[in-house]
Image (cartoon, helix red, strand yellow):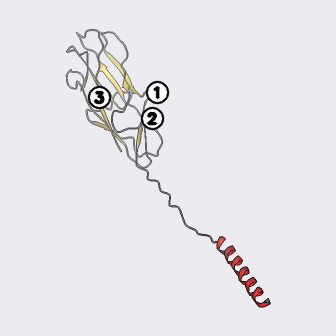
């Protein structure tokens, strides 16, 4: 009888030791994490692919007998137009056609009162109005470092005889390629 008891004791001891070893098994592996970044730009702090607000060019309020009125394209916050593009990109702004281009002598563009009266004006990249930005002309601020870049764009409207009082407007198409 004694032999059977000791054999049974060793068998139970072996089963207990085996179950403890199996409970301590470790399995290892990895998690693969990815992120894909695409180039992008913000115009005056906003992003999108169409309908962006590149700013407003206001010549202010003056009399119908004015000789010259100056303005600057300002972003929604009241400062100059800004673009912020991905580092390493080379943004180019194309200042396209306006709604009334060529309809008044004295400028390549024109503001209209919607009654057949036009105020000629032009756009320039400098305050001295010496560097004309032609229709479909481009402004290339250089290689982006990822920091916002200021784009200065100025307008000069020229008065002419016979302009009636009223509100004169134009809409200019603009695109940004990067």
As helix, strand or loop, the secondary structure at mark 2 comes to: loop
- The image position of residue 50, as x and y in percent, is 33, 36
164 and 106: which is toward the camera:
164
Residue 45: image tag:
2
The quarter of the picture where residue 152 lies is: top left
Q: Nearer the viewer, mark 2 or mark 3?
A: 2
Residue density around tag 3, few if under 14, some if 14–19, many if 20 or more, within 10 Å: some
Rendered view: 96 above or below 113: below
- The image position of residue 127, as x and y in percent, is 39, 27
Cβ atoms at labels 2 and 3 below 8 Å apart: no
The Cα–Cα distance between marks 3 and 1, rounded to whole angstroms, is 20 Å
Say which residue appears at 43% left-offset and 29% top-offset.
80
Quarter that holds the C terminus: top left
As helix, strand or loop, the secondary structure at mark 1 comes to: loop
Which label's residue is closer to the chain start, 2 or 3?
A: 2
Left or right position of 49 against 147? left
Say which residue appears at 73% left-offset and 80% top-offset.
13
164 and 49: which is toward the camera:
49
The quarter of the picture where residue 62 lies is: top left
Q: Residue furthest front?
A: 1
Quarter that holds the N terminus: bottom right
The quarter of the picture where residue 106 lies is: top left
- The image position of residue 66, as x and y in percent, is 31, 12
51 and 15: which is toward the camera:
15
Say which residue appears at 20% left-offset and 25% top-offset.
102
Tag 3 residue: 172
Rendered view: 22 above or below 38: below
Cβ atoms at labels 1 and 2 below 8 Å apart: yes
Which label's residue is closer to the chain start, 3 or 1?
A: 1
Tag 1 residue: 77
Residue density around tag 2, few if under 14, some if 14–19, many if 20 or more, within 10 Å: some
């Amino acid at each position: 009888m004694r032999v059977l008891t000791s054999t049974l004791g060793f068998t139970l001891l072996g089963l207990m030791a085996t179950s403890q070893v199996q409970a301590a098994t470790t399995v290892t592996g990895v998690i693969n994490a990815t992120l894909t970044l695409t180039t992008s730009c913000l115009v005056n702090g906003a992003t999108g692919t169409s309908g962006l607000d590149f700013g407003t060019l206001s010549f202010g309020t003056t009399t119908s007998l004015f000789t010259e009125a100056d303005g600057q394209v300002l972003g929604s916050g009241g400062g100059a137009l800004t673009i912020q593009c991905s580092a390493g990109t080379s943004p180019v702004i194309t200042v396209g056609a306006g709604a009334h281009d060529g309809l008044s002598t004295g400028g390549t563009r024109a503001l209209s009162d919607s009654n057949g009266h036009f105020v000629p004006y032009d756009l320039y990249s400098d305050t001295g109005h010496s560097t004309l930005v032609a229709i479909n002309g481009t402004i290339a601020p250089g290689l982006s470092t990822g920091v916002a870049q200021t784009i200065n764009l100025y307008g000069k409207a020229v008065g002419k005889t016979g302009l009636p009082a009223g509100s004169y407007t134009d809409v200019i198409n603009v695109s940004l390629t990067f």
